[in-house]
């Protein structure tokens, strides 16, 4: 749990990713972020959505999981809860980067159309500890120019985040609407549990389903014995892993 939270915090601080510092802007010029985390040990989970002043939304999601009776908190309520739990609150300007702001202005003035690569900047982490506990976490700034309080798949448990010690831990990035419709993260776990197939096969099956309805994206996953599976139906996805054998790998493209 600590490894997942801290890894996502580090990624959050990099303006290269669409999460935290460098999150994209909504149509109204705000940063609205979503995060979720899940423990495979007891199937407990927490999430926050539409937050703009919590410095570490993934930590807020963990607090929701551990100290509240709820799974997801939204907007001002999530911020009020974070304050109550003594998490760091910042002025929304903390998340501002000129590159993301300029990109919003281009879209608003119809100088540039969004591409699929513009949508995918979610960060996530999955981990297996020495006691066999799995954890998954996902954090995003959403999509540029989003309106009407749109919430994607990142804070939805079972859509882009899922963990179960019996099966696997999964974190997705992509166009969240498709992942919500299919419940893709939990589907992978369910196929492993009820059809008795391995993570690789379950992952391939689910990626095909996503593609058939027009969804684009990818995911990182690890099973209960430490098998790492990374899949995508896009040209690339920033990704990395480390295992107990000392193998470390960082990749961008397919």
Image: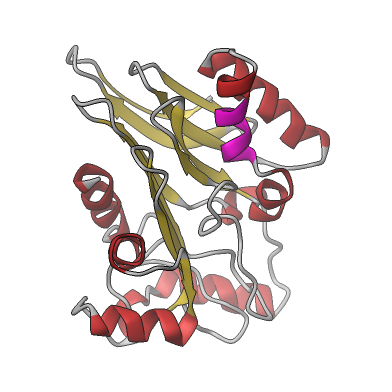
Q: How is the image coloured?
A: secondary structure
Query: How far across and down, in percent of the image, does residue 77 sit?
Result: 43, 84
Q: Nearer the viewer, residue 111 or 81?
A: 81
Q: Is residue 203 above or below residue 121?
A: above
Q: Nearer the viewer, residue 54 or 144?
A: 54
Q: Is residue 89 in view?
A: no
Q: Is residue 73 above or below residue 15?
A: below
In this rendering, the count of numbered labels is 0
Q: Nearer the viewer, residue 108 or 18?
A: 18
Q: Nearer the viewer, residue 162 or 34?
A: 162
* Residue beneath the point at 29% across and 78% down: 82
Q: Is residue 155 above or below residue 194?
A: below
Stretch of the chain drawn in magenta: 184-190
* Residue beneath the point at 26% across and 84% down: 83
Query: How far across and down, in percent of the image, does residue 105 sit?
Result: 59, 79
| Residue lying furthest right | 213
Q: What secondary structure characterizes most of the magenta part?
A: helix
* Residue beneath the point at 63% across and 23% down: 191
From the viewer's perspective, is 97 left or right of 194? left
Query: How far across and down, in percent of the image, does residue 58 sit?
Result: 33, 61
In the picture, the quarter occupied by the N terminus is top left
Query: How far across and down, in percent of the image, does residue 50 sit?
Result: 50, 75
Residue 158 shown in magenta: no
Q: Is residue 228 in view?
A: yes
């Amino acid at each position: 749990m600590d490894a997942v939270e801290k890894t996502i915090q580090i990624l959050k601080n990099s303006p290269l990713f669409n999460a935290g510092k460098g999150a994209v802007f909504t149509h109204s010029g705000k940063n609205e972020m979503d995060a979720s985390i899940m423990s495979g040990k007891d199937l407990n989970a927490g999430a926050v959505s539409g937050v703009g002043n919590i410095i570490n939304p993934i930590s807020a999601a963990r607090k929701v999981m551990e100290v509240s009776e709820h799974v997801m908190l939204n907007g001002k309520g999530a911020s009020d809860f974070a304050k109550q739990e003594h998490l760091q609150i910042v002025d929304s300007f903390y998340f501002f980067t000129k590159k993301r702001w300029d990109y919003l202005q281009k879209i608003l003035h119809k100088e540039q159309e969004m591409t699929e690569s513009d949508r995918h900047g979610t960060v996530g982490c999955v981990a297996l500890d020495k006691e066999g506990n799995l954890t998954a976490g996902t954090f995003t700034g959403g999509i540029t120019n989003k309106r009407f309080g749109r919430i994607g798949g990142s804070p939805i448990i079972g859509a882009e985040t899922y963990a179960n010690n019996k099966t696997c831990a999964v974190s997705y990035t992509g166009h969240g609407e498709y992942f919500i419709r299919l419940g893709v993260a939990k589907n992978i776990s369910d196929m492993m549990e009820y059809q008795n197939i391995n993570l690789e096969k379950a992952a391939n099956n689910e990626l095909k389903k996503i593609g058939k309805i027009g969804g684009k994206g990818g995911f990182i996953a690890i099973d209960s014995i430490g098998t790492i599976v990374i899949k995508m139906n896009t040209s690339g996805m920033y990704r990395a892993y480390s295992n107990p054998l000392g193998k470390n790998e960082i990749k961008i493209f397919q």
